Every structure is written in C-alpha cells, then in structure tokens.
Image (cartoon, rainbow, N blue to C red):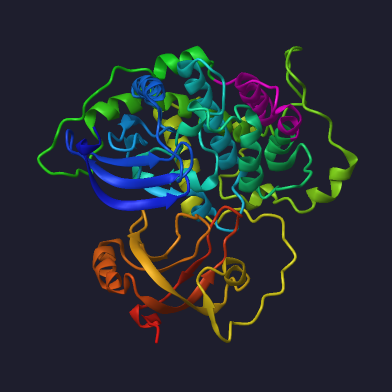
Amino acid sequence: MIRRFQIEDLVAQDATGVVFHAIDSETGAEVAVRRFFPHGPDGGGLTEAEQSAFAIVIERLSTLSHPALRAVISGGCDPVDAMPFIATEWVEGDPLDAVLGDAAMPPEAAALLISQALEVSELLSQVLAEEAVWVETGLHSVVVSRTDSGRGFTFWVSPFKWLGVDGNRDLRSIIPMVETAMGWTNQSVPDQAGRGLGGWLRWLRQHADSASLREARETLAASLGSEPPVPAPRLVSRATMPPRRIPLSAGRKSSAFPVGRCLAVLAMLCAVGSVAWLLYDQARQGRLMLPGIVHAEKPALPAPAAEDAPVAEALPAVEELPFPSTPPASEAKPAPSEAERIARANELAASLSKSPAVKAEPKKEEAKPSAASGVIPWDETEKINSHGGSEITVRGRVWGVEVSNTRKTVYLLFAGTSNKRALRVGIEGKPEDSEAVKTQLERFTQKEILATGMVKKAKYTDQRPEILFKDMNAIREAP
C-alpha cells in the first residue's frame, strides 16, 4: 500500500515519527504521508491484532470530511517492520506557532480555534464510539491554511490516542492550547478576559477531567454569549460521506480543488460557518458573555475571583483588535447568507497572517548575553537558546538537508535530529529557489562545518532553536 505514494520531500521528523510530502499515484493528488512509531523510535511496530484494529479505524476515518480536519485517504503498516502510516490530504499553510510568533491570538480567532478542536473531537468520538479529544492540540501541529484554500485551521487526528499509546482522553490537552494561544500560561484571568474566554478557561481548569465534549462546547457558547453549537448527530450526518476517488488529471499537480473533495467540503463548511456566525453575531450585538449555563444540569461558570483584578490591566483593549468595530444594535443587519458565514470563518483564520496579532501581557525583559565570542557546539541547546536574538557561530557535522513545508527555508540538520529539540540552521528565500539552495547545501553533508547566523530562540520546551543565516557565505567547512 505504501508504494502507492511517491515520496517527494521530508517535511518533519522527531521522536514520534516522520512526515513526507508525497504524490498519490492513483489520483495525482498531493498528500502528507505520516509514518509514526507507536512504541517510540526504538520500539517495534504493530502486532497482527493491532494491525487489524488499525485498519478498521482508517476505514472509518476515510469516510469523514470536515474543513478543520486533514482528510484521511489511506493507511496501513509497512510489510517489513510493521510500522504504521497514515496518508492524509496535503494542506497548504503554516504552523500556528510560527504564525503567532511571540504574540497572542485575537479572541475571536482563538474562539474559532477552540470551537473547531472541540467540534472535530466530538465528531470523531461519534465515529470511533469513544469520547476523547482526538486531535493533536499543540500549536506546532495546527495549520493555518492559506487564504485561497478557505480552510481556516486544520488539525491532525492523533493516532497515538486510538492506539492507546496516549492514554489522556479527557479535556486537559485543550488547556495548554488555550493558555498558549492567548498568552495566559499559568495565569489567573478574569471571566471577561478575551471577550468571555477567561471564564470558560476557568471552568475548563476545574472540570477538564470530568466534563464531556458537549458540555465544553455548550459552555464555550454561553461564555461568548452565542447560540448553542451544532449537536453531534448533525455533525455526523454532515461529515459522513462515501469514499471518493479524485480523478487523475493530465498534470501531476493542479491548483484547482479536486471535485470530489470540493463537494464534501461544500457539504461541511456550514458547520464551521455556523461557528463563525455565532462569533460575528456576538460582536454585532455587543454581547460579551453570559453569567452561566441556563440548563441546571450543566456546571455554571464560577464568579470572578478578587485576585484576578490586577491581570485585567494587562489585557488588550477591544479597539486594538484587528477586527471590525461593533455597530450599534439599532443598525443590526439582516442575517447573512450561508456564503457570508463561510467567508467570515475564513476571514478569522486568515486575519492571523494579514493583521498584527494582539500582544500578550508584557513580560519583564530577560538580560540577554552578548554575542558569543567563540564557537558553540551544535548540541549545546541551552547555551544556544540563551543567545536568542544574537548572532553566534556553531560547529557540527551535517547529517542531512531538508526543505520546510512552506519551501521558504532550507535547513542543515545535525546528527541526532530525531530529538525535536535539536538545533537546525537554515537560509530563508523564495519558495521557487528552494531546490537550488538545497542542492548547494547538500555538499556539506557528512562534513564538519561552521555556521554563523542569528539565533531564533525556541519559545516552548518542545521546540528546537534555529539559526538563520543570510547567504552561503555564512557557512563554511571547519578547519
């Protein structure tokens, strides 16, 4: 089965597995092939019974189409080592953490991100007959799709959860996603923060290990002052479709969206459109939040605590957000069409790239060391990371070369880069020049080099630092 996919490029790799950009030889479509290690890089593949269960899940997932989910095309296990792989549609875009940088998300965009993660998880829970947050919630794994795709945010379904490797099935994985996106990590925020997201986060921290996805979605809508979300049965009816094969076009690649998948997306965009309309309706009518859930059986949002007051001063003002101002209620317009709702959902995601994001709470500047006077070995990650924003020179033996998924950056990788925190150095340029740059850099493979460039400090503990150099003159063989 894996021979069906023609590998084009290595996109990413870490201790959990590797992702390739490939071409589906049966359809001519671009795909992402993810080969992963269910028991770690030193563990084995799947047993015969596990392979059968894996195939059943792949078959179920291949019938789903949702704008916020990478559509599963195929999957199986390598006949040699029994390592599993999944082939999904290729989604053009950039990782959310790279789009945000050091800034926080606008509240409306963060609300859409959370709503889609919960909605897709409830859809998958219905299909897999077990409730869990089935999507990967790390910001590095969420793609902000390009404007012309009309997709907004897209998520990976986590194979480690359905294989039982990751036993965390409750809502706790949503908490760090919200905190990181809004710049609220380890902070106590008032309920009104983020136009109601603060109250929902407070509720989630208290009920993450016991609340259902339905309760989380309904509580989120109430915190935002929006209408209740689309119920799970309707999500399933909209998302479930018979498998479709994309016709093979004359050329290998096409800029047009495949007809079969386009029909599926048109049938499903109303789901994300309804979320966007709820957010739009909230801003139009000036409703920031409700005091709690109306139904008695649902946990009500707790009252703001006195110790939260100082944090409010650091929260961004509404007029600073890159979204249209709220018109008076007397100027309310007729309900928008379905096409307008869909466009609004796409606009929220696209605004992350087009507009300056809302700045997070100002942090006390750390004292930065001066530029390194000597050469730092590539594997001294902490020392390199301490020079964030400074120019340094590193030394190491090159293991390989890879092109980023945006094709804007070509990286030199050092030995041991299965560790996702390992350093990599790269040069940025035009996507159309990436192959030529890669060819030039490949001459350094298996050679000891010195590379001088600016350190891009890793923001989170699960990210690697990077060094970006300006041109080929910044890299040379070590004496």
Q: Is residue 234 located in the magenta-colored stretch of the structure?
A: no
Screen quadrant of the N terminus: top left
Q: Magenta region: which residues?
A: 202-229
Screen quadrant of the C terminus: bottom left
The percent position of residue 34, horizontal first and vertical second, equals 36, 41
Going 30% across and 71% down the picture, which residue do you hit? 441
Comparing 136 with 78, the one in front is: 78
Q: Is residue 412 left or right of residue 362?
A: left
Comparing 238 with 196, the one in front is: 238
Q: Quadrant of residue 51?
A: top left
Q: Is residue 205 located in the magenta-colored stretch of the structure?
A: yes
Comparing 311 with 442, the one in front is: 442
The percent position of residue 109, horizontal first and vertical second, equals 55, 41
Going 81% across and 29% down the picture, which residue do you hit? 302
Q: Is residue 163 visible?
A: yes
How many badges with numbers are in the image?
Answer: 0
Q: Is residue 268 left or right of residue 5?
A: right
The percent position of residue 299, horizontal first and vertical second, equals 76, 20
- Dominant secondary structure, magenta: helix
Going 34% across and 21% down the picture, which residue do you hit? 59
Q: Residue furthest right?
A: 306
Q: Is residue 333 visible?
A: no
Above or below, 370 relative to 62: below
The percent position of residue 168, horizontal first and vertical second, equals 61, 30
Q: Quadrant of residue 288?
A: top right
Above or below, 106 relative to 215: below
Q: Is residue 5 left or right of residue 452?
A: left
Going 55% across and 43% down the picture, which residue do you hit? 138
